[in-house]
Image: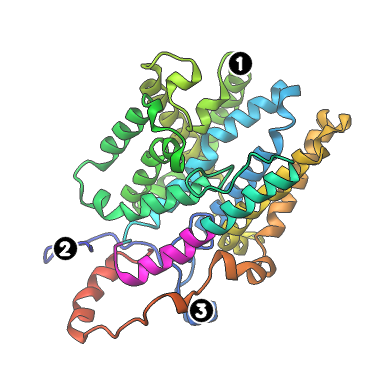
């Protein structure tokens, strides 16, 4: 399904250039020949989005590394709460933004399979076996219906992308998505299959990304917003410190209904709306601080999917083998050391060398599995070209 041509004389805002899927928020992947072309021969990537994806994946790795330590430090737990409020929403909004022109064309479906479904099967299997043998957990079975740890994001991304044409055709997609998230928050019977609670409760952020335009990002990348973000984050940290003994951090994971958290059913919809507002505020502040120019880490933004999928093995190995049990790690200097180590580790995992080594499982070509693409009739190609010009970025 594709968007219809705009009426004659109406001007549309051009969308950003295409972005490859190896980003932590995968998008339809170009061919090997396109990936190997010099940057000067293809469309230029927007440094802002690559910078945002890299910084977000660093926050993800830091948050995961804090989990074994945060129980001993109220300050660290407050920082953990603040980071968990916005780091995944920031990822998901960008994912939705670059999904705006996704349709059910065969080539895009193939890339969805090779860029999302295949990595999910591979890494869900790998993580399940890793926990079974490294953690000596014989009850841990390989189940593609029950994502473990961080593989839920690939399930969610597949579902969100497949439903993108529907969201793009609704008049009021965001209120509908919020309604679905609120319904999920009061439906414990949904269970753990495919981690649908997270799929539903994080859905509004993806739909918001679908609704966004370039000017929305430009509005938060101003000097005034950057300055205002300082007291906002300071206030968020203060509130997080206050909320540590008073609030269950499981609310920020979006994986349970209100009843499963021991709260009255009506708190589910209230918390969905409250967290949505807080997450958007902090995400806007985060985007305001993201550099717009090319930096030393801009190129790493193309490899954040690798960092996301691989860093979990290191963090969980530390948990299984007792690396976090050393007493000195539970003090301020140890917490800083763990934070810096996590940032350095995920940075290495986003490098081109890692991407080249593991592309066969994260971005497989799999030409053997699909029929060759047929040449498109010239008439259809000419009719589709204006639509793709207006919807570049998928």
Front one among 312 and 69? 312
Comparing labels 1 and 3, the label whose residue is closer to the camera: 3
- Residue that mark 3 sits on: 32
- Residue that mark 2 sits on: 6
- The stretch of residues the image draws in magenta is 103-119
| Cα distance in 3D space between marks 2 and 3 | 33 Å
State the quadrant of the N terminus: bottom left
Image quadrant of residue 131?
top right
Judged from the image, the secondary structure of the residue bearing numbered disc 2 is: loop
Q: Is residue 360 within the magenta segment?
A: no
One can see residue 315 in this view? no
| Cα distance in 3D space between marks 1 and 3 | 51 Å
Assess whether mark 3 and mark 2 are in contact (beta carbons under 8 angstroms).
no
**Outermost left residue:** 8
State the quadrant of the C terminus: bottom left
Judged from the image, the secondary structure of the residue bearing numbered disc 1 is: helix
Res. 242 mark: 1
* Residue shown at the point (62%, 18%) measured from the top left: 244
Assess whether mark 3 and mark 1 are in contact (beta carbons under 8 angstroms).
no
Residue 379 image offset from top left, x and y in percent: 17, 83
Above or below for 12 versus 187: below
Above or below for 384 versus 80: below
Main SS of the magenta part reads helix
Assess whether mark 1 and mark 2 are in contact (beta carbons under 8 angstroms).
no
Residue density around tag 3, few if under 14, some if 14–19, many if 20 or more, within 10 Å: few
Is residue 178 shown left or right of residue 11? right
Front one among 130 and 275? 130
Image quadrant of residue 30?
bottom left
């Amino acid at each position: 399904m594709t968007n219809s041509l705009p009426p004659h004389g109406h001007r549309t805002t051009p969308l950003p250039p295409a972005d490859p899927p190896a980003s932590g928020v995968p998008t339809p992947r170009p061919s090997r020949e396109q990936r190997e072309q010099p940057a000067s021969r293809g469309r230029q990537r927007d440094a802002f989005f690559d910078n945002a994806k890299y910084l977000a994946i660093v926050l993800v790795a830091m948050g995961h590394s804090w989990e074994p330590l945060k129980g001993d430090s109220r300050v660290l737990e407050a920082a953990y709460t603040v980071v968990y409020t916005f780091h995944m929403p920031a990822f998901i909004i960008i994912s939705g933004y670059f999904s705006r022109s996704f349709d059910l064309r065969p080539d895009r479906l193939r890339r969805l399979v090779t860029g999302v479904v295949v990595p999910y099967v591979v890494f869900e299997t790998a993580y399940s076996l890793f926990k079974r043998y490294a953690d000596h957990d014989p009850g841990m079975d390989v189940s593609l219906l029950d994502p473990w740890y961080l593989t839920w994001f690939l399930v969610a991304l597949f579902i969100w992308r497949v439903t993108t044409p529907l969201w793009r055709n609704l008049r009021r997609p965001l209120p509908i998505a919020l309604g679905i998230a609120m319904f999920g928050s009061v439906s414990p019977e949904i269970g753990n299959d495919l981690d649908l609670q997270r799929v539903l409760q994080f859905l509004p952020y993806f739909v918001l990304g679908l609704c966004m335009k370039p000017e929305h990002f430009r509005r938060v990348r101003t000097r005034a917003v950057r300055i205002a973000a300082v007291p906002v984050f300071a206030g968020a940290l203060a509130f997080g410190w206050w909320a540590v003994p008073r609030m269950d951090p499981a609310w920020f994971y979006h994986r349970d209904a209100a009843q499963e958290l021991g709260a009255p059913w009506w708190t589910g919809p209230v918390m969905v709306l409250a967290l949505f507002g807080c997450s958007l505020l902090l995400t806007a502040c985060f985007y305001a601080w993201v550099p717009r120019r090319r930096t030393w880490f801009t190129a790493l933004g193309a490899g954040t999917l690798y960092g996301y999928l691989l860093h979990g093995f290191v963090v969980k190995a530390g948990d299984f083998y007792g690396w976090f049990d050393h007493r000195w790690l539970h003090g301020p200097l140890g917490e800083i050391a763990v934070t810096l180590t996590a940032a350095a580790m995920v940075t290495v995992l986003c490098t081109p060398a890692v991407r080249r080594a593991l592309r066969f499982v994260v971005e497989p070509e799999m030409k053997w599995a699909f029929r060759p693409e047929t040449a498109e009739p010239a008439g259809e190609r000419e009719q589709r070209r204006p639509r793709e010009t207006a919807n570049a970025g998928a």
